[in-house]
Image (cartoon, rainbow, N blue to C red):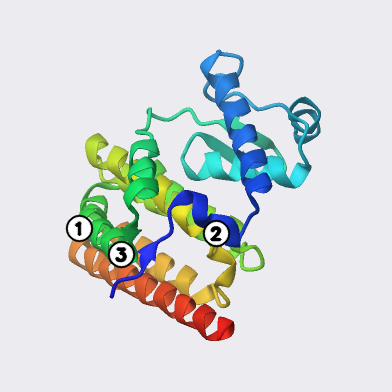
């Protein structure tokens, strides 16, 4: 029987309800800054110490909230420079899918089936169309993965942004927006189990291979590698679940 992906409230294996509520307060606060026009596209957010004082949570919680918004494409984190409001096109919110997940749950099989159906073709389009800045954006996330082997949560953010960058590189704003929405939901579901991953290098290597195929303008190769990657990711997460089940028994 297919394993159900836990609904968002069941991510307590990685964070307590209090931690989740505190992180949500950071997200709400930052979204408020953006909606009120106090932080505009391309503008730097207040420093972490100021956010700690204003929101009343720990610096760790601030970073968790900012990472969540970065994974959804709302923010851009530039290490050494600060956190900035993204100045790209508007993105679809993953909240409707998140609500459905909370009500009904999704199996991992369903999630990856949807991702393969969507992202394999998009990888091919990106290989046909990506140029200049689009290729640089994909390459930046691969570099970030290689720099984040000791931080699975940061690695996950780069992973999500890699797939978003490929969506943008497809040149189709409708497909790119759907990738944004689905990747936001996947991030919320995966971040609770990301720390189970033990060897991140093979994952980074596969992303690098996909990037090279896109850079070489090889659509069939890019699509095949994306399919291989998503199949392997599903199998790896199934294996992680089985390992956790054995530990409990």
Is 248 situated left or right of 232 in this image?
A: right
Question: Residue 232 vs residue 50: left or right?
Answer: left
Label 3 element class: helix
Q: Residue at x 70, y 40 (%)?
A: 62
Of mark 3 and mark 1, the one earlier in the sequence is: 1
Q: Which of the pair 160/182 is nearer the observer? A: 182
Name above or below for residue 175 compared with residue 139: above
* Residue 49 visible in this rendered orientation of the protein: yes
Q: Secondary structure at mark 1?
A: helix
Residue 162: x %, y % from top left: 43, 53
Q: Closer to us: mark 2 or mark 3? A: 2
What separation in Å lies between label 2 and label 3 (alpha carbons)?
A: 31 Å
Tell whether label 3 touches label 2 (CB within 8 Å): no
**The N terminus - image quarter:** bottom left
Residue 248 in the image, given as x and y percentages of width and height: 57, 81
Residue that carries the numbered disc 1 in the rendered image? 117
Badge 1: how crowded within 10 Å, few (<14), some, or many (20+)?
few
Q: Is residue 127 above or below residue 21?
A: below
The residue that disc 2 covers is 192
Q: Which residue is mark 3?
A: 213
* Proximity of marks 3 and 1: CB atoms separated by less than 8 Å: no
Rounded to the nearest angstrom, the CA distance separating label 1 from label 2 is 25 Å
Which one is closest to the eye, mark 3 or mark 1? 1
> Which numbered disc, 1 or 2, marks the residue that appears first in the sequence?
1
């Amino acid at each position: 029987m297919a394993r159900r992906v836990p609904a968002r409230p069941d991510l307590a294996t990685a964070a307590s309800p209090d931690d989740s509520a505190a992180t949500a307060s950071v997200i709400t606060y930052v979204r408020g800054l953006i909606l009120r026009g106090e932080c505009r596209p391309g503008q730097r957010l207040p420093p972490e110490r100021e956010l700690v004082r204003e929101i009343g949570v720990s610096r760790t919680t601030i970073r968790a909230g900012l990472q969540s918004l970065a994974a959804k494409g709302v923010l851009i984190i530039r290490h050494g420079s600060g956190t900035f409001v993204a100045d790209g096109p508007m993105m679809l919110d993953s909240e409707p899918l998140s609500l459905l997940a909370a009500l009904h749950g999704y199996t991992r099989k369903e999630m990856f089936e949807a991702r393969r159906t969507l992202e394999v073709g998009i990888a091919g389009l990106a290989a046909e169309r990506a140029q200049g800045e689009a290729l640089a954006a994909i390459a930046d996330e691969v570099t970030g993965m290689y720099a984040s082997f000791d931080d699975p949560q940061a690695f996950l953010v780069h992973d999500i942004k890699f797939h978003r960058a490929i969506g943008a590189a497809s040149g189709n704003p409708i497909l790119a927006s759907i990738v944004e929405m689905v990747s936001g939901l996947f991030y919320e579901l995966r971040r609770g189990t990301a720390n189970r991953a033990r060897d991140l290098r093979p994952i980074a290597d596969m992303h690098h291979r996909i990037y090279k195929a896109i850079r070489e303008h090889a659509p069939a190769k890019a699509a095949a590698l994306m399919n291989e990657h998503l199949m392997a990711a599903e199998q790896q997460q199934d294996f992680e679940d089985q390992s956790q089940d054995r530990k409990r028994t």
